[in-house]
Amino acid sequence: MKTCPKCNLSYPDEKKFCKNCGGALNVEPTLDPKDIAYKSVYEDKLKINPLDTTLLREYAQFLFNKLLFKDAITVLLKVLAIDENDSFAPGLLYQSYMKIDKLVDALEIGEKLLQAKPEDVFLLSDLADIAIEMGQNENALRYLENIIKIKPKDKEAWIRKADLLNKASNKEEAIAAWITVYNIDSIHPLAALYTGIITCNNKDFQTTIKIIEPIIEKIENPKEKNLAYLYFAYSLLKVNDFDAKTLPSALKQIDFKEFENNTNSDIKGILAEIFIYQGNRRILENNFDAAIDLFKTSQKYNDTETCRKNIAEAYFKNANLKFKNKLTTEAKENIEKAIVLFPENAEYKTFIEKLTKEGKKKKRKMIIIAVFSIFILGLIALLANNYINNKNERNKISEKKLQIL
């Protein structure tokens, strides 16, 4: 026979899942003949003396050892019914409930055990696990806090606490917990990451690089790894470490789309500076269109006067490039966009005046060329007409001479 540990329903051996909850079924343990005999003896003895708690405890332990947890629970509850202060039954009852995933009952008995042994770290850890599985994160945090009070440097308790706080969106306390983990174990990836974030926000960029660089590839969660690359790249940028490989390689690892809707002011500031850096790199390559796009992206995260100046300067430099390539119309479009951003800029005004004069010169030149072209065409037409007329006259003369002959 098989049973569902959640629903307590029994099924034939060929069944695999519970019809009620869909959970996997447990195989009910079978006893060999020797154990069946022992079980029968215990039952016979209890028929004679059903209230013998010593015998009941022995029988419960026997059943537990033979994986008959449900039967053990029944016997242990009987012990407690006879003597509610029995010190043996609660511990084995707690273990039995845990074995069959009766979490609510296990938590209830566990709390009673905790009253007798408030500094039992293993029990506290078990209860934290149960609370987490039941979605009782506040209770889990309470158990973990008790562990930390007893063992202030219990790394696993701090890690679990940090993880729970992070899931509860309690970012500040979560980061504080990760820093504690880092102080206990400096190579723990997430602890190093969040400690590196703190040092970066405190503008200690060299320390951030030293902390984050060794652990980036050890971070398993893609979002947290992306965050690590962001802070690592930004710190490289801030210490002017423009190594031909390190910074560009770090920037390539960042999925910027993940940060598009980020509301964290520190991260928004970092993104703005990174896009400005990338925009300036494009300017050095004379790729002004790409630079403008990058500066505009930076502006989305941090719309400052400096950012607008970057965009205007990129338009201005692009206008100069277009003008050198004799693309006057495109040059005018770019400088006009620069002037919209900074209408009082004297350099921009001078350039637009230069473009206007150049446009007028070009227009006059085109008029002169057009007039000259018309004159030449007229002259050609006149000469052609004279030539035809002369030719016709010569032909007539030739015809008359032929007639006289």
Image (cartoon, rainbow, N blue to C red):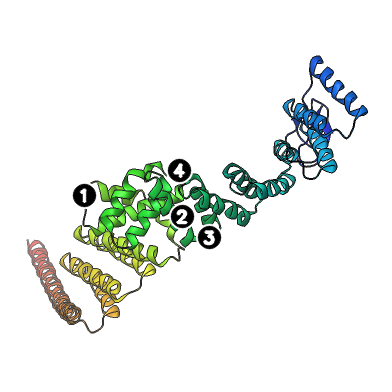
Q: Which callout, 3 or 1, points at the residue further toward the start of the chain?
A: 3
- Marks 3 and 4: CB-CB under 8 Å? no
| Three-letter code, disc 1 | Asp
Q: Residue at x 90, y 30 (%)?
A: 49
- Between disc 2 and disc 3, the foreground one is 2
Identify the residue at the far top of this view: 33
Marks 4 and 1, how far apart at CA: 26 Å
Q: Quadrant of residue 398?
A: bottom left
The percent coordinates of residue 278 (x first, y second) are: 28, 59
Pointer 1: what residue? Answer: 243
Residue 134 is left or right of residue 395, and the answer is right
Frontmost residue, 68 versus 374: 68
Residue 122 is left or right of residue 376, and the answer is right
Marks 2 and 4, how far apart at CA: 19 Å
Q: Residue at x 35, y 73 (%)?
A: 303
| Three-letter code, disc 2 | Ala
Q: Look at the image and tell me in which quarter the N terminus lies.
A: top right
Pointer 3: what residue? Answer: 169
Q: Which callout, 2 or 3, points at the residue further toward the start of the chain?
A: 3
Pointer 2: what residue? Answer: 177
Q: Secondary structure at mark 3?
A: loop
Q: Which callout, 4 or 1, points at the residue further toward the start of the chain?
A: 4
Q: Residue at x 41, y 51 (%)?
A: 226
